Structures are given as C-alpha cells and as structure tokens.
C-alpha cells in the first residue's frame, strides 16, 4: 500500500491514473498511452520545452547554491525582464518586484505586507475565491473544497478556523452560455462594497475561481471602493497572468483601474521550476523609501528558478504566445458554445483566453464533499475523457470541468481536445436525463431553465 497522502483533481474514489512522463502537449501514462494535457495551469509551455530544459540544465551546471540574502545579479535581471516583457506599457506605475516560491506564498506575503503597511488586520475577497494553501492565503480561500480542512463522508466537513476577520464580496457573474443573468447595474450590484471594505488592510480579487470570471466593470467598481476605504487592492494573477488570459498579458488590464499589488505564480517559471512574484506599485514603493520589507527565505529567487523565469519570459515574447492564445480563444468560444447547446447536462459555460469552465447540472457547490462514495458527475466525464485520450480536470468540484491547455497548443490539437470533451459529455447527459425524469415525476416540472447568450 502506498504511503503517499494523495491529492487528486477529481472528487470520489475513482482509479488513480499514473503519469510517467510527458512531452509537448501530451502526458505519457503508465499504461503506455499518450493523452492530451487539457487542464494544467502550471504548464504554460507543456512538457520538456527545449528552452526550459536548456535553462534549468545550464543553471544546474554553473550556478552556486545561494540564498535570498545574498545578491545574485541574474535575479535582478529577471525582475527587469518581468517588467520590460510581461508589463510592457505598464512600467510607469510599477515600483518593485520580489520573487517567491509559489503563488500561495506570494499571496500570503502580499496580504501580511498589506496588514503591516496599513496597520489593519481585516481582509476581503470575493465569493468562491481561492488564493492558496499557505498562511493568510489559506484563510482567504473561501472556495469550500480548497479550505485546507477535512472532508467527511457524511457531509459534516471540518474547515480550518479563520483567525482573521475575512469579508466576502459578491462574485463576478458572466457566461457565454446559461448560468445566472448578469446584474443590470454593477454599481447597484456592488452597492455595499465600500461598507464591506471599511477598515480592511487589503482586497484581493482572483479572476477564475469557481468558474466565475471577472467583468472589467466589476473590477473597476471594487477597485474604486477599495481606494475610497484605504484598502490595498491586490490583483491575484496567479492563474491568469503571463498569457493565459488571452486578450492581454494580465486579466486586470481589461479594466481602467490599476492595482496596488499584483501577485503571480504557477506559470511564472514556465512549469520547469516552482515560482511566484509580488509586484508593488510605485506609490507603495515611494512610501517605503525609509522602510525595509523584512521577509526572508532560503530558496526564493534561487539561480535555477531565476533562469527558468527568464527563459519563460523570452518564450512568451519570441514565440508570440499571446497571439496564439488569442487565436485559440476564438476556437474555444465558438466550439464550447456549440457543445453546450448540444448537451442538456451543461448548465453554464464561460472563460477567457485558455482558461474555461464547463459547469454541469447537479448539486449546489456549497454542498461539496470529496469523500463521497458516489463518483460525482464531473469526475465521470473526466474519466471518460481520459479513456478517449485527454486529461481534463474538475478542480475537485462535483459539477465543474475546467480547460486550461498549454499555451503552445495548436488549433488542431485544441479541436481534438474539444471533440473528446464533446463525446465524454454523453456520460453526463445520460445521468441528467435520468435525474430529470425522476424530478419531473416528483415535482411535475424540471429543476433548471437553460438559456443561451
């Protein structure tokens, strides 16, 4: 029996799929198959990208073991590259960069920095947020299945107690298909935001969690409320940053407002090394002229991480990956809408760039439990997709599938991935039709009204 404490993407007790390798946009499995990597936010360049392999091998062969407390010239150059390449056109408001080991750590330290900077302790986020599994980032993770606690088979889940005052804002609401109607007036929808944010140190907003993607007016309204109350606005770009968002390098660039702090993770080191970053605004840095942000770590900004960060930034620029994401986004939008209209099991579809959510009819997300004896419908679809040749994740949810393929994927490969999803959804359709028949017999009408936008 394995001694590994296993964390799977899918809820339920399905068969464990063992990955033994990968190349390009494919995973290599223990049974000898190669399957498309369809849900991997940490692998923007897929697997064994030559540029990343060369960078890490070179750093391993020439660099000393050096901690964050010692000056390393390439670390400073990586900060310059990040600003000049990823934040091109945004340089006028950026004050400084610090590298971290992960997005969770970046969010944790950005939040504690905000508390020290403002002298406040309360923090705010939005419904269904996920910001990481470390320190304050964990306490700001209000998406129930990522709270870091215990999921119990009888449904009496045990979340981690929150030691801080955590305020929760209404979520963004949007969809290309189904779901809820977006608010007619964003100012009215967020009319209580300023009251919610009073005396908070920071307001941290992510752009994808729970399949709830932001609208620019949503961002700008919250940013305005944060400014009014003296709450620092943190744009959590751990998933969306550095190309995945599609229309721009970062999701926040879709709005007119600009954050006080940006946090990065997942793709920042191209999937070849763990990595994260915190970017502070020029205004904050100017106010820090007589202060030192005392947060030290042995392995942050280590030479191999720094080499990987610089290699990924060069790949973004020289391989024109943002252009590829923008082209593939159109394919995603068109084909996912067509797929949704074919399958009665689909409740809602939305996304940006190369991050999309397909939400199925089923239990409310608040009723989540991973220790369920019955395999959830989304996991059944994921299992079927794997049989057909693609790894599609559920992010641990009972009803939601998410698509986040590598940014290097070709249009032909993306269409193959979507064709597999299309076929796999037949599993959910059968279950939905069966459940609807039972529901109509009991209630005389269906549970859900489907709508297309």
Image (cartoon, grey):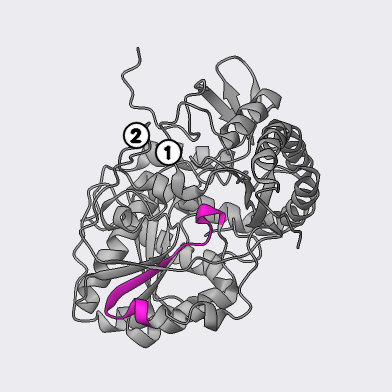
Residue 149 picture location, percent across and down: 30, 42
Can residue 256 be seen in the rendering of this structure? no
**Identity of the residue drawn at 76% across and 42% down:** 343
Look at the image and give the residue range highlighted in magenta: 195-211
Asked if residue 204 lies in the magenta stretch, the reply is: yes
Can residue 229 be seen in the rendering of this structure? yes
Asked if residue 424 lies in the magenta stretch, the reply is: no
Position of 252 with respect to 107 (left or right) is right
Q: Residue 152 carries which label?
A: 2
Furthest toward the bottom, the residue is 228
Q: What element carries label 1?
A: loop
Query: On the image, numbered disc 1 is attached to which residue?
Result: 369
Which quarter of the picture shows residue 120?
Answer: bottom left
Label 1: how many Cα within 10 Å (few below 14, some 14–19, many 20+): many
Which quarter of the figure is the C terminus placed in? bottom right
**Identity of the residue drawn at 24% across and 81% down:** 289
Disc 1 to disc 2: CB gap under 8 Å: yes
126 or 445, nearer to the observer? 445
């Amino acid at each position: 029996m394995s001694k590994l404490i296993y964390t799977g993407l899918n809820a339920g007790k399905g068969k464990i799929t063992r990955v033994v390798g990968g190349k390009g946009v494919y995973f290599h499995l223990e049974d000898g198959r190669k399957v498309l990597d369809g849900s991997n936010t940490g692998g923007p360049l897929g697997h064994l990208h030559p540029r990343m392999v060369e960078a890490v091998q070179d750093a391993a062969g020439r660099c000393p073991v050096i901690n964050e407390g010692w000056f390393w010239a390439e670390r400073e150059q990586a900060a310059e590259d990040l600003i000049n390449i990823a934040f091109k056109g945004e340089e006028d408001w950026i004050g400084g960069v610090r590298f971290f080991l992960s997005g969770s750590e970046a969010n944790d330290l950005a939040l504690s920095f905000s508390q020290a900077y403002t002298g406040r302790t309360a923090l705010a986020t939005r419904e269904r947020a996920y910001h990481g599994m470390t320190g304050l980032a964990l306490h700001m993770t209000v998406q129930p299945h990522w709270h870091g606690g215990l999921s119990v088979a009888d449904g009496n889940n045990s979340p981690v107690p929150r030691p801080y005052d955590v305020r929760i804002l209404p979520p963004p609401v949007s969809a290309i298909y189904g779901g809820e109607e977006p608010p007619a007036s964003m100012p009215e929808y967020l009319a209580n935001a300023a009251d919610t944010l009073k005396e908070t140190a920071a307001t941290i907003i992510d752009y994808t969690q729970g399949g709830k993607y932001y609208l620019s007016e949503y961002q700008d309204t919250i940013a305005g409320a944060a400014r009014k109350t003296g709450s620092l606005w943190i744009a959590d770009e751990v998933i969306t940053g550095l190309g995945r968002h599609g229309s721009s390098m970062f999701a926040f660039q879709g709005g007119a407002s600009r954050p006080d702090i940006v946090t990065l993770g997942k793709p920042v080191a191209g999937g070849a090394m763990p990595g994260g970053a915190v970017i502070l605004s020029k205004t904050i840095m100017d106010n820090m002229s007589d202060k030192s942000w005392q947060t030290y770590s042995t392995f942050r900004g280590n030479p191999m991480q720094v080499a990987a960060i610089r290699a990924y930034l060069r790949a973004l620029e020289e391989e024109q990956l943002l252009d590829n994401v923008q082209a593939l986004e159109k394919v995603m939008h068109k084909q996912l809408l067509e797929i949704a209209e074919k399958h009665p099991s689909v409740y809602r579809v939305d996304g940006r760039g190369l991050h999309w959510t397909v939400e199925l009819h089923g239990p409310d997300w608040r009723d989540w439990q991973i220790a369920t004896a019955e395999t959830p419908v989304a996991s059944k679809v994921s299992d079927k997709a794997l049989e057909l040749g693609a790894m599609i994740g559920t992010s641990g949810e009972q009803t939601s599938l998410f698509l986040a393929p590598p940014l290097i994927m070709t249009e032909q490969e993306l269409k193959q991935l979507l064709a597999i999803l299309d076929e796999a959804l037949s599993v959910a359709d059968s279950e939905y039709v069966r459940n609807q028949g039972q529901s109509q017999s009991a209630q005389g009408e269906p549970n859900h009204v489907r709508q297309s936008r």
